[in-house]
Image: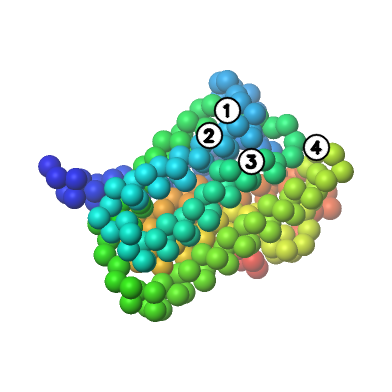
Amino acid sequence: MAATDLYPWFVWLEIGLAVVTFVALCFIVAPYGRHGRGGWGPTVPARVGWLVMESPASILFLVFFLLGEHRFEVVPLVFLALWQLHYIQRAFVYPFLMRGGGRMPVSVMGMAMLFNLLNTWVNARWISEYGTYAVSWLADPRFIIGVLVFLGGFALNLNSDRILRRLRGDGNSGYKVPHGGGYRYVSSPNYLGEMIEWTGWAIATWSFAGLAFALYTIANLAPRAMSNHRWYEETFADYPRERKALIPYLL
């Protein structure tokens, strides 16, 4: 069977994983960060975990991208730049900005690496091989709207992470209630920003691959946002009651 015939099955696999992940995370909270706990096997420093599990999404995307027939065309190169904008920051900047001495189970790191391998291949191969984008796509409303949504989500994600880091600026490793920015409205604007980002990617690429990634991002982060919100309410008696978990004024 040709690779072209196999490709759609990998996209469907990612969508299937989104469903399984969403159902599982509605009952099990991933054991890292504020929800860290024992019983999940050996651990590594959180900084190491983030670097190891996210770096393949940057490095392998470039490798898979360069295998494609359309690798030197304008629109695929723009998509490459958007992807790397997120993942260079997430893999090679974010871990070194982290404060605190948290740890991450190797099992969590390994599962994230496997997903990143699948997702990176699915999206890179679409962008530079199976998809076709004329230069005129740069003026298409779907591309323009998608890129603006992506950049807006990226900015929200960065600013929200920065607010969390500042809470530990005095050397205190404990958790505090964040304020300002997206935290005026929701408990996890960093997750909301990432969900917005990849929704923008799906719109800009107008692809089944992009849709699969957006769906998985929502399936992975929405349940965690709800868990974070419950944790804040249970931990801090003065937690703002008007603040929602993920979607301002709604959820």
Given contact means CB atoms under 8 Å apart, are the residues at marks 3 and 2 in contact? no
**Which amino acid, by three-letter code, is at mark 3?**
Pro
* Residue that label 2 marks: 52
**Quadrant of the frame with the N terminus:** top left
For mark 4, what is the residue?
173
Q: Who comes first in sequence, dot 1 or dot 3?
A: 3
Q: Secondary structure at mark 2?
A: helix
- Could you tell which of marks 1 and 2 lies nearer the N-terminus? 2
Q: Outermost residue toward the front?
A: 72
Question: In 3D space, how far apart are the residues under numbered discs 4 and 3 (Cα atoms)?
Answer: 16 Å
Can see residue 91? yes
Residue under pointer 3: 95
Nearest to N terminus: mark 4 or mark 3: 3
Reading the image, the residue beneath label 1 is 105
Where does residue 193 sit, x and y in percent of width and height? Answer: 58, 59
CB atoms of marks 4 and 3 within 8 Å? no
Could you tell me which secondary element the residue under label 4 belongs to?
loop
Residue at image location 37% in from the left, 66% down from the top: 75
Q: Nearer the viewer, mark 2 or mark 4?
A: 2
Q: Residue at x 70, y 44 (%)?
A: 97
Mark 1: amino acid: Pro
14 lies left or right of 240: left
Q: Nearer the viewer, residue 63 or 196?
A: 63
Query: Which residue occupies 57% across, 37% down?
Result: 51
